[in-house]
Image (tube, helix red, strand yellow):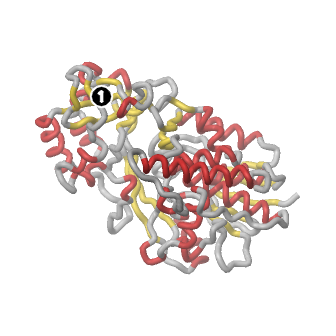
Amino acid sequence: MEKAIVVGAGLAGCEAAWQLAKRGIRVELYEMKPEKKTPAHQYSGFAELVCSNSLRSDRLENAVGLLKEELRRMDSLIMECADAARVPAGGALAVDRTVFSDLVTEKIKNHQNIDVITGEVEKIPDGNVIIATGPLTTPDLFKEITCLTGRENLYFFDAAAPIVTLESVDMDSAFRASRYGKGEDDYINCPMTEEEYTAFYTELVNAQLAPLKEVDKQVVFEGCMPVETMAKRGKDTLLYGPLKPVGLTDPKTGKEAYAVVQLRQDNREGTLYNIVGFQTHLKWGEQQRVFGMIPALKNAEFVRFGVMHRNTYMNSPLLLDGRYRLKNSERRLYFAGQMTGVEGYVESTSSGLVAGINLARELLGQKPLVMPDITATGGLAQYISSGAVSKFVPMNVTFGIMCPSDKKFRGKGAKAEKNRFISERALKYVDEIVGEA
């Protein structure tokens, strides 16, 4: 039986190990938890979600919705467990994080072809390897990767939003609704008047930040920007972002509020909610003080404050091909997850699936499976392997990195119609190659 090593049991690593194992490859999966954790991790299970419990839109008019459906049809372990751990979130796929992690962990540990080995990996192992250690790869291994590639790696900062208890939310000052009525009132909405928002904004932009550690400068990825950084771009910026009131009618007034903070269910029991878009680097005491200025959160109990941590990623267009394999190397060495420059949980899963399938195919003497950019999976892989090297930045999946449609769409709803056409085209291709993959 052929053997492979996967380093890291996050979403990408677990997906890669699963794809290898189901194809008859013997897998050694290395994970340093629970012996050692990064600053972002708290739970001991595999595939821990640390930034949000939402895997974002589940609609085919949205690129990440398409990506999730492609993964489902290609027998993704992560998507199987995510669907089983789903909690209400309107048109999005959100999960109970503990249930989700436990499901993935159980599946991995019980697979007959997977051996889980606990401990930190400090050097790149010999043999057939997929490295999926994430954006917080430990210094010794990251140094090894840097020496191997001969390239200076880039970095950015990522942030996680606070979580509050439902019972501490003042529902007299809040209301349940989903934007534009999509979903079954899955969000708790915390409205603010113009006067309340102005006071909140003033304190937010002047609040104290937690000290940065072991870094010289701050580079923030646009898709996960701290709320205070966003606010400093202008007083109205938040009103077009996470505090946008559009599509949310307050049943008490029959009108839209000046600003609305949304809370999204974070666990299956519905006892915990995260503050949507409130990733932050404020000191914990400042978070309690400033976020408590939101009327519905005046007595909020924080079970987790927002945190910020260093994320690292590779200059992948120079280093990796469309299979996530190291270019111009005789070694069977693949990378997966956010360290490759894919941004987001679903995107990380996609990279692990592609890397796992292709390492298995290589070991079995089969042709590589390079997904074309008519699919979301392929568009993401092509972006990280052939994007602009000088300006390479992490990327969420978007229709913009996929092959456009030659068909023209006009009139009201044209964009949604076009996106659905692209999605249906992609899924038709995926269905055709599922047996081959």
Splitting the image into 4 quarters, where does residue 348 fall?
A: bottom right
Q: Which residue is drawn at 36% across and 58% down?
A: 222
- Work out which quarter of the rendered image holds the N terminus and state it: bottom right
Residue at point 23%, 50% (across, down): 237
For label 1, the crowd category at 10 Å Cα-Cα, with few meaning under 14, some 14 to 19 and many 20 or more, is: many
Q: Which residue is pictured at 41% across the width and 45% down the height?
A: 413
| In the depicted structure, whether residue 193 falls above or below residue 328 | above
Q: Extreme left residue here?
A: 195
Q: Which amino acid does label 1 sit on?
A: Ala
Mark 1 falls on what kind of element? loop
Specify whether 197 is left or right of 437: left
Residue where numbered disc 1 is placed:
300
Q: Does residue 379 show up?
A: yes
Would residue 284 be found to the left or right of residue 265 on screen? Answer: left
Q: Nearer the viewer, residue 417 or 330?
A: 417
Residue 168, position in %: x, y? Answer: 32, 23
User: Between 37 and 279, which is closer to the camera in this rendering?
Assistant: 279
Residue 138, can we see it?
Answer: no
Quadrant location of residue 184? top left
Assign the C terminus to one quadrant of the image. Answer: bottom right
Q: Is residue 363 left or right of residue 376?
A: right
